[in-house]
Amino acid sequence: MRKTMFSKGLSSVVVSLAVFGILYHSGLARAGQAHSTDQHADEVLVGKIYQKDSHLQKILFDFHRTVRRSGNETDATRTYTYPNGRIAAIEKATYRKGKLVSYQLMQKQISAHGRVQIRGNVQQGKGQMSFRYVKDGETFTNIEDLEASTVVNDTLVPYMLAHWNKLMQGKEVYARYVVVSHTEAAGFNIVKSGETTWKGKPAVIIKMVPASFFVRLVVDPMYFIVEKDSHRVVKYEGIVTPKVKENGEWTNLEAVMVLPRTPRVQVTAR
């Protein structure tokens, strides 16, 4: 029998949103480029996730993104680990000839895993997405149509930067974000909310909020600090991929993620 996660309430649709992963491509795309990431597959990114309100003093998780290419196929793997090295979660985006074909989520903390397979062309908004998520012995599935605004973690920042001029004009950009753990895509609005500085450099604050008024009542906005000149996402505040255990239950974690500059390295061939 086909099962979906729609019955779990409005907030649950987006509460596990992996915006954490949005940062993986900070600085990899530039305004005006299409949101394909294959042309930037020679980047390694590292980051640290800090406890909210700890003033970047308490590290909760480390983040590491690597890329491997085999022929026309590229895998971008993002790993979240505790400070002691134990793995909390893994995500993998697979591209074929620069086009996204699948995205996987492995939630080691809660022994759950899921995948969305994409048949068609995201840039053209033609095709379908097939979802499968397994947790606590139950399998949930769903099928949705593709839209040109459809994004996953690895393509959201390139998509956002492709609409940079529109954002700088104060206009909203709509994104249909894939949430594997809820076997669906949820609508979000992205908008410039202000300006600031980051380590002495001019920066822009980009806010991402659920498109639904009712979901906005229960889900807080997510914020990105983006360098004006380089268009690098250097800081993110909001829900992250790893979870935290409170009173014996795994719950979603709101935290701060910072991504320092890392040197460009050669992609690993296989």
Image: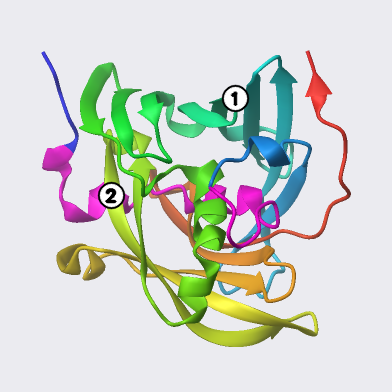
Label 1 Cα neighbours within 10 Å, binned few <14 / some 14-19 / many ≥20: few
- Three-letter code, disc 1: Lys
Instruction: List the residue tagged with mark 2.
Output: 186
**Quadrant of the rendered image containing residue 225:** bottom right
Residue 160 lies within the magenta run? no
Question: Image point 17% across, 54% down: which residue?
Answer: 10
Q: In which quarter of the image is the N terminus?
A: top left
Residue 205 lies, with reference to residue 159, above or below; the image says below
Residue at (67% x, 32% y) in the render? 86
Q: Position of residue 162 (x, y in %)?
A: 54, 59
Q: Where is residue 187 in the image (x, y as percent from the top left)?
A: 28, 55
Q: Mark 2 or 1, which is nearer the eye?
A: 1
- Where does label 1 land, which residue? 97
Location of the C terminus by quadrant is: top right
Q: What stretch is highlighted in magenta?
A: 6-34
Q: Quick check: 227 left or right of 252?
A: right
Q: Nearer the viewer, residue 40 or 183?
A: 40
Would you say residue 110 is visible in this rendering?
yes
Side of 227 relative to 270 (left or right) = left
Q: In this view, does 186 lie to the left or right of 53?
A: left
**Which residue type carries mark 2?**
Ala
Q: Position of residue 143 (x, y in %)?
A: 22, 26
